[in-house]
Image (spheres, rainbow, N blue to C red):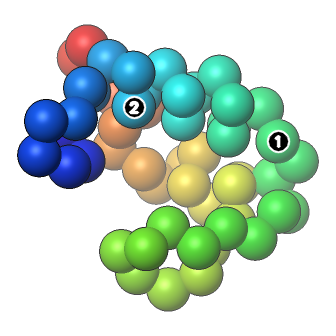
Amino acid sequence: MDLFGGDFVTLKKTILEKMFVLFENIVVYTGHGPETTIGTEKKSNPIRYMEM
């Protein structure tokens, strides 16, 4: 879960279905680190492998 009371299933679904479909060179600001790109997050963000 990202925030208290958050829903992990919804969070993961949103990241995979809304964000990871964007062009890989799009810069994003996650709020928990330096700026990154969709492509970098697709390769390194562990949420992709976490069980729902």
Picture coordinates of residue 1, whole percent (x, y): 19, 39
Residue with the most extreme left position = 4
**Residue 42 point in image, percent of width and height:** 59, 45
Label 2 neighbour load within 10 Å: few <14, some 14-19, many 20+: some
What residue do we see at 36% from left, 74% from top?
32
- Label 2 sits on a secondary structure element that is helix
**Residue 28 relative to residue 30: left or right:** right
Separation (CA) of disc 2 from disc 1? 16 Å
The total number of labels drawn is: 2
Locate residue 10 relative to residue 13 in the image: left or right. left
Q: Which residue is mark 2?
A: 11
In which quarter of the view is residue 14 placed?
top right
Q: Which residue, given by chain and number where applicable, does mark 1 sit on?
A: 22
| Mark toward the viewer: 2 or 1 | 2
| Residue appearing at x 81%, y 52% in the figure | 24
For badge 1, the amino acid type reads: Leu
Answer left or right for 2 relative to 21.
left
> What residue is drawn where x is 13% and y is 36%?
5
Q: Relative to 12, is 4 above or below?
A: below
SS at badge 1? loop
Quadrant where the C terminus sits is top left
Amino acid type at image mark 2: Leu
> Which residue is outermost to the bottom?
34
